[in-house]
Amino acid sequence: MMLSDLVSSSSQEIAPSVRALLAAFHEETLQKLAIAPIDSDPIYQAADGWLCRVGEDGWIFDSDAVLDKADTITIQPTSVRDIEEPCDETLTQNGQRRPYGGIGVGNDEQLGLDFEVEQTEWGKWVDPDRRAAQVRKFLEYAGLQRIPSKPWPEDSAEVKRLDPIVAGLFPDMATAMAPENANMADAFICFIGECFIKFAGAKWVEFEWFGRENSFYDHVNPALLMDTYDEDVDTAWGLMESMIDYHPEVYDGMFSQIAKAIREYAADHEEKRREEASSVM
């Protein structure tokens, strides 16, 4: 046999069936290489689908236990958890707090949620900017420059001037709750609320709603939680009713009754602050 015959026979083209088989075998080679660890050992797949690792010496491992353990993916659990956390509160009729639940996120975590949260009716009412604007509205109507730095004293000339102004606005509960007076009633409620906040350490809380006949608002029932030892709670509706139904033999007018309530809660608040301060000394 001549050398030319050997060269001729070795340069024959690959049969189409073999070429198709090789193409199918290498079809996902790039994808497999992309996801395979750089230092991974060759893995042999038997006809029955069984996988086994090929060692450096070319021999197949007898057991796939090492393979299973090495290829296990460690999953780190997320730290976002659904727990009850007090982000706000509502008060029931007996004064018990009913916390709202929420998604709790740890101190070193952030929950990136890029969406707008629709404000609730309570959130709209208690909004500080809205209440501040309403306070200014009543101050302007009553001819007041500002809320005083201290509660009005019993013989305050300003209280005496405010008595007829308040009586003219709200001669009775029906007038105070009339739709045409809703805006001014809300302005006055925000005004007296700010007085209790300033002098008695109060804060607005959402009280349980018992219907429109027991609230100045359609869907919320604002109440003031006083910073006193008793943690007294007065709804806006209750304060207005008590003021309008005041006893003339006891008070000179409606606002005189409110001014006295502010003084009493302010005194209780100050007593609590003094005792708390002395207990930590």
Image: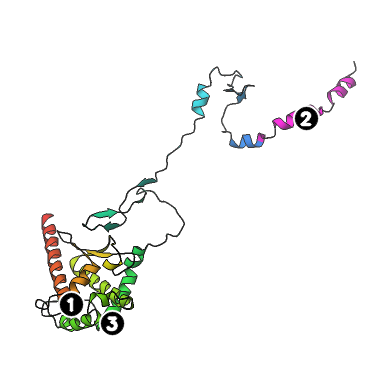
Which of 149 and 62 lies nearest the eye of the viewer? 149
Sequence order check, earlier mark of 1 and 3: 3
Q: Is residue 174 left or right of residue 271?
A: right
Mark 1 residue crowding within 10 angstroms, few (<14) / some (14–19) / many (20+): many
* Span highlighted in magenta in the image: 1-29
User: x, y (%) of residue 99?
Assistant: 29, 53
- Do the numbered discs 2 and 1 sit on residues whose CB atoms are within 8 Å? no
Using the image as rendered, state which of residue 174 and residue 1 is in the foreground: 174
Residue holding disc 1: 255
Give the mark toward the camera: 1 or 3.
1
As drawn, is 67 to the left or to the right of 94? right
Q: Are marks 1 and 3 in contact (CB under 8 Å)?
A: no
Residue 150 in sight here = no
Q: Is residue 197 left or right of residue 66?
A: left
Q: Position of residue 33 (x, y in %)?
A: 62, 35
Res 19 label: 2
Please, is residue 59 above or below residue 167 in the view?
above
